[in-house]
Image (cartoon, rainbow, N blue to C red):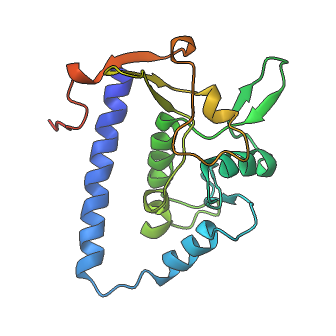
Amino acid sequence: MAKANGLYTQYQDLMADVVAAKKALESATIKLGGLESALRDVVSPTAEAKPFVLSGAGYALMNQTSTFALGVHALRKACDNAHPTFVKEDGSRIYRPLTFEENIRARLDVYNTLHNPDGSERSDDDRLRLFYTWLDSCTGIAYKKGTTLFKMITESENLIRIPKGFNESYLPVDYPQLQGVELDSSQGKFNHLTFS
């Protein structure tokens, strides 16, 4: 739990830096044209599904697709690096989206990487790049029908193995069979952040 609290504290500190950086950019006459065009290249829904590797950070940022399912399948097809994998029943591995925690760590790692592999200093735009884009995750939240119970599943097999053609708002699952942390939405403050 201390590890999670430390990560959350580091994330809060970083978000304060991001807010300050955004305010500075809003008050200055700096154009974000370079970042916008770079993100347009990465996020273009018609772009070919190739990963964009962020300056020496070891993360691949995939082009945006029209559905989560298409994005998962594009990731499997495009990855050929040390990206995390999921082990299937037969022992084979498939690439999977990062978990929610891995997404936070990726944002922190990329932000805290001050220099490019060639030793040159990284720009604020490059360091903040993962904060300007949506990151999909294989972490799932499953709700038990007719109750206030829900489960957090860190690596949801249902999301990792989602059929390519799936295009619905919710993915039907067998709630009792899911392995995850079960919580009760009536017993906590889930829409409230507390800052110390």
Q: Is residue 151 left or right of residue 120?
A: left
Q: Is residue 158 above or below residue 89?
A: below
Q: Residue at x 66, y 45 (%)?
A: 166
| Location of residue 7 (image quadrant) | top left
Tell me residue 114's x, y (percent): 48, 58
Q: Residue at x 57, y 30 (%)?
A: 172
Tell me residue 113's x, y (percent): 50, 53
Q: Nearer the viewer, residue 185 or 80?
A: 185
| Location of residue 20 (image quadrant) | bottom left
Tell me residue 17's x, y (percent): 28, 56
> Quadrant location of the N terminus?
top left
Q: Is residue 121 above or below residue 107?
A: below
Q: Nearer the viewer, residue 174 or 58?
A: 174
Q: Residue at x 70, y 57 (%)?
A: 51
Tell me residue 110's x, y (percent): 50, 52
Q: Nearer the viewer, residue 185 or 108?
A: 185
Q: Is residue 57 above or below residue 101?
A: below
